[in-house]
Image: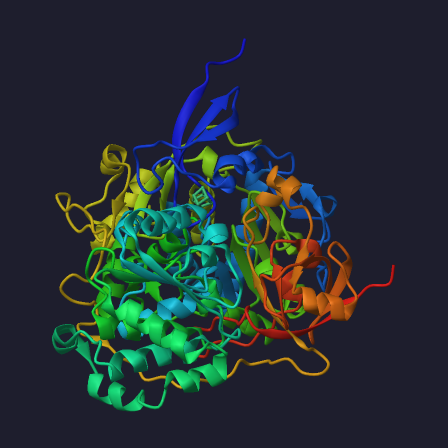
Amino acid sequence: MAEADTSVRSTCPYCGVGCQIDLKVRNDRIYKVDAPFNIAPNFGRLCSKGRFGVDFVHHPSRLTQPLIRKDLGSKPRQPVGLEGFRPATWDEALDLAADRLAEIVQARGGDAIGTFCSAKATNEDNYIFQKFIRGVIGTNNVDHCARLCHAASVTGLQIAIGSSAMSNSIAEMKDLDMFIVTGSNTTETHPVISTFLREAIVNHGAKMVVVDPREIELCQFAELWLRPTAGTDVAVFQAMAQVIVSENLVDRDFLRERVENFENYRLEISDSTPEWAEAISGVPAADIRTAARLYAQANQAAIYWGMGISQSVHGTDNALSLSNLALLTGNLGKSGSGLNPLRGQNNVQGCSDSGGLPNVFPGYQLVTDDEIRTKFERDWGVLLNPQEGLTTMEMVDAAERGAIQAYFVMGENPMMSEPDLRHARHVMEDLDFILVQDIFLNETGEYADILLPAASFAEKSGTFTNSDRRVQLIRPAVPSPGQARADWEVLCDLAVRVEQRLGRESSAGFSFTSPAEIWDEMARLTPPFQGITYDRLERESGVHWPCPTPDHPGTPYLFTDTFPRGKGQLVSLDYNPSAELPDDEFPFILSTGRVLYHWHGGTMTRRSKLDDIYPEPTVEIHPLDADQLGVQAGDWIQVRSRRGQIRVRTLVTERSPQGMVFIPFHFAEAAANELTMDVRDERAKIPDYKVCAVAVEPLAE
Ligand code: SF4
């Protein structure tokens, strides 16, 4: 007899909007997804991914048992499918993993191991991950995909104001007077947020300025669309700042009370005129002036940006150019007014908050600060490494020169997300040991020695923190397939086994029985979380951190009185061209990004019915370029860079300007990162995924 239907409240596993969803379950299968109408942040709205894309949970290719590579130890290692692995028990797989990790720690020290935690896993999973890596393995080599999406936003905002979180909540969007959207195709990347932004325009009369080389859908609603040549954003924002200063549109009181370095900045920006920026970016000087006046004269003005700004060799400068605008005009510290990097993955905010970064414990407490480190040492009962760890890309460099011997990758897919994949593959081939924990065998898992099957978001408890810092619960709705286990359980089990091999007394530091217990430990050590408990999340459905005490209401918008660094800092900037520009051999600029129906490396959406809607890799090309190349919509063509080539289907559209092509990065069979280059922003270490030079070539039939 069929079981009664159940409805389980959870949080969407795709993007950083963090929509609340109701999973409708019958016979242990999710058959439908709804959204509650009365709860933030989405108030009943969902996009195609949240509504129709969670069927990946039941896909037959889910990992259901631990697997061990058959040709263990052979080098160079080759990627293998499931046939290249043999099944193992949990004990066998975890014992082998613990043996290998402990051997490396004893022989070379923990810094010989590079680890990747997960912006798709819960806060509790990531807290345990970094506790295990820091407290048992003994290294701070912990990073995750935030490095590859918003590291430049984080770095820039830390310099300017000392905090990298979104200033404002999603709920404030509908009351905006004016906002700038730049480097974010919001209708496809954060669809539900885009509905609130459009509501502000339609219902509240807000004025929007879009700054983007592509004619994204939001342009249809914009008061003004500035179309800079890709990679010239800094010049445009510098010129807007110059207009604001030269026309005395600054907020004098705000500058006096809350900002430093204005006099220097004022002098140094005087030459960055709109005409100067027009010569660099192609944006008409008059439009730059109009945009600057609209922003400076609004009562409530916000800036929203995405990876189009941050994934750049000048990403930190891009973010600083935006913080300069907000500081000059006092558009910070008020409801609706702020700086808002739209975070990508469902829990990329939370993974960083939980200590998934090489320089900080949970709550951005520095690993190099003796007092803070002592606090964690006392609580965890271990001695901790005082050196900052390596970032994602630095771990690749270290592996290449032999300083890193092993990778532990939980719920990430660097073999799709890293730039210049040919180089990344070469590095993986020579590692001594690779441990992967995931829900599917993906392109990274194909290199693993041991694969550990993980439970999906629909099979476990925990919390995700969305882009606006709202901590929300997920709850188990269906059983895990086969022997798959929650990440935190696997990590605790593995940590104890490694401790035993290292001859350490088990410190009881991993004897948790529930994610709620893990949260309580993290909150105890992390001041901004101390007022948040699972009971409270059950009652209130979500709380914005900082929330330092149980009676604190949470903080929907930040910086009311001060910035974490004290005064905000205006930073003078130079314009520098992109690292690789078109030439005769590679005459097009390539930009990469997302489409509505897919998500990042496609691990989940390509195993959902969404893949039927968008099943093939595409390249967006302008009609005049297509004519010149003699290709038509639907033709398969080759796109080639100095690093590799891929075969994609032509999409002829005026969306991308002449001379620029756009390729979504979701398709393993035509991975856009075969083409991109490993050139990084110096401060944030983020690669440039938005500007490199490619050739586009018709293929013979
Ligand atoms: Fe999920 Fe983001 Fe879509 Fe909301 S907007 S349903 S969080 S993918």
Classify the position of the C terminus by image quarter: bottom right
Residue at the location (58% across, 53% down)? 601
Classify the position of the N terminus by image quarter: top right
Q: Position of residue 666 (x, y in %)?
A: 61, 54
Q: In this view, does 378 lie to the left or right of 46?
A: left
- Give the quadrant of residue 164: bottom left
Q: Is residue 196 left or right of residue 630?
A: left
- Give the quadrant of residue 140: bottom left
The front one of 236 and 16 is 236
Against 347, residue 568 (above or below) is below
Ligand 1 visible in quadrant: top left
Q: In this view, does 517 lie to the left or right of 46?
A: left
Q: Can residue 519 be seen in this view?
A: yes
Q: Is residue 210 left or right of residue 114?
A: left
Q: Where is residue 436 in the image (x, y as percent from the top left)?
A: 57, 51
Residue at the location (67% across, 54% down)? 668
The front one of 419 and 701 is 701
Name, please, the residue furthest toward the front. Answer: 286
Q: Position of residue 563 (x, y in %)?
A: 20, 67
Q: Is residue 383 visible?
A: no
The number of numbered discs placed on residues in the rendered structure image is 0
Q: Position of residue 367 (x, y in %)?
A: 31, 67
Q: Which colour scheme is used?
A: rainbow
The front one of 624 and 328 is 624
Against 273, residue 417 (above or below) is above
Name, please, the residue furthest toward the top. Answer: 1
Residue at the location (18% across, 76% down)? 259
